[in-house]
């Protein structure tokens, strides 16, 4: 059984039935699809790799790729370059509905249901006294009801970000993803991700404690800073959402219940990206439920560790270093002159990359040089 029909839940259901065709899989979600979900809508190349592993490689082929990324550091250092593999931007209203339909087409039963109780005491998991399963994948989001019901705490506020997302009109030929960082309240940044239809997903995010420290209403801060950083792209349909970051990730489950995606706090602490983590962790959880239905959690732990262990340790360290705007300025300043550093930043921020020691030393040397000799000037890769 899968609770939650977003990318993690749909991937879990698909992963299970692909491993064992004909398997009875039930997918529960409190909403009907299509439904909106506040998110940056970005789907990086690693996410498309996961779609291929789920047997739906062409799910978003009708959306135009965005081949170029521009990043502005807190002190105004800018790097713009083509990414090694293009990203896509697909509204969650569309993406999630397509995933659920793909699961349904593969034989997954989909029902609308809000989970209220869960019993782990017997040989099967019982939800609300009516649904029984040998294993459960909890993919019900940042405010996971299942996580609470199995006794795991919510992500601490110090490991939680908050963002506001909307849509804005942009030129139809805009194909550059923009991330504009802000020194005030750092870590904080705005984004503009063009969809390809004359609109872009735009938003602004920051750590929840930094928002509270302003002493101002959240709406005022988030909406105001978005307008300040992207003055030429007035946003509509603004919605706020919390992002439980992987630096505060809990145990990945309990008993026969496995947490995936946002429910497992699998959101990149450097960029807020979560769709790749959701698809990957969901697939691994679904596969584990099939391979070890009596005790799936140990296998799921091993699969997660093998797929993301070194990467998550890398992002844990980088998230601490990134509390200094000087470190981020140095990383982006180095990326201006070294394409391999730019590619590495994308790989770590949007995929499962780690940092080789030589590149870490290069960024560290620039950070030290900037600290001792003053900040470099803004630059751009042609």
Image (spheres, rainbow, N blue to C red):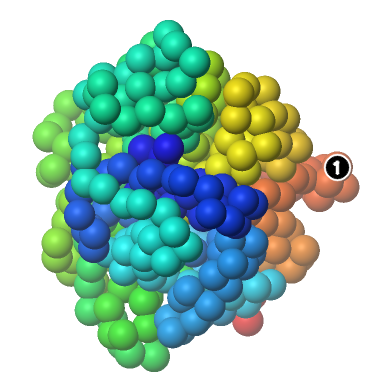
Q: Which quarter of the rendering shows the C terminus? A: bottom right
Quick one: 90 or 98, which is closer to the camera? Answer: 98
Left or right placement of residue 282 versus residue 32 in this view: right
Q: Which residue is drawn at the image coordinates 49% and 81% (left, top)?
A: 61
Q: Which residue is drawn at the image coordinates 21% and 35% (left, top)?
A: 114
Name which quarter of the figure residue 97 lies in.
bottom left
Is any atom of residue 199 visible in this view? yes
In this picture, is 172 found above or below 279?
below
Left or right placement of residue 223 versus residue 60 in this view: left
* Residue ID for mark 1: 357
Point out the residue furthest to the top here: 121
The image position of residue 32, as x and y in percent, is 20, 54
The image position of residue 88, as x and y in percent, is 48, 72
Is any atom of residue 349 visible in this view? no
In this picture, is 152 found above or below 317?
above
Name which quarter of the figure residue 103 lies in.
bottom left
Number of dots carrying numbers: 1
The image position of residue 183, as x and y in percent, is 41, 44
């Amino acid at each position: 059984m899968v609770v939650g029909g977003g990318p993690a839940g749909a991937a879990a259901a698909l992963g299970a039935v692909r491993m064992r065709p004909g398997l009875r899989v039930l997918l529960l979600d409190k909403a009907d699809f299509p439904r909106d979900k506040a998110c940056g809508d970005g789907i990086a190349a690693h996410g498309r790799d996961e779609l291929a592993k789920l047997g739906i490689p062409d799910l978003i082929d009708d959306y135009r790729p965005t081949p170029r990324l521009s990043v502005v550091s807190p002190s105004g250092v800018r790097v713009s370059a083509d990414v090694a593999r293009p990203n896509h931007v697909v509204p969650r209203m569309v993406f999630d509905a397509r995933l659920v339909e793909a699961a349904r087409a593969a034989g997954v039963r989909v029902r609308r249901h809000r989970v209220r109780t869960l019993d782990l005491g017997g040989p099967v998991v019982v939800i609300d006294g009516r649904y029984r399963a040998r294993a459960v994948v909890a993919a019900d989001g940042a405010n996971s009801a299942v996580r609470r019901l199995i006794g795991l705490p919510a992500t601490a506020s110090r490991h939680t970000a908050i963002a506001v997302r909307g849509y804005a009109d942009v030129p139809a030929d805009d194909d550059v993803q923009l991330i504009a960082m802000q020194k005030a309240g750092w870590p904080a940044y705005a984004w503009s991700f063009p969809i390809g239809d004359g609109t872009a997903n735009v938003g602004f995010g920051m750590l929840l404690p930094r928002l509270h420290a302003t002493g101002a209403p959240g709406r005022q801060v988030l909406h105001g800073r978005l307008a300040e950083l992207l003055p030429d792209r007035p946003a509509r349909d603004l919605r706020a959402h919390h992002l439980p970051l992987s630096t505060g990730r809990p145990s990945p489950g309990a008993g026969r219940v496995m947490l995936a995606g946002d429910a497992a706090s699998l959101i990149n602490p450097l960029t807020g990206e979560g769709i790749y983590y959701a698809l990957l962790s969901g697939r691994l959880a679904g596969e584990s439920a099939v391979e070890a239905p009596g005790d799936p959690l140990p296998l799921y732990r091993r699969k997660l560790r093998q797929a993301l262990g070194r990467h998550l340790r890398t992002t844990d360290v980088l998230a601490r270093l990134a509390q200094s705007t000087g470190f981020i300025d140095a990383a982006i300043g180095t990326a201006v002159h070294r394409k391999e550093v730019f590619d590495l930043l994308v790989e770590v921020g949007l995929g499962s990359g780690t940092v080789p020691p030589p590149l870490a030393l290069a960024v560290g040397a620039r950070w030290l040089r900037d600290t001792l000799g003053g900040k470099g000037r803004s630059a751009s890769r042609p």
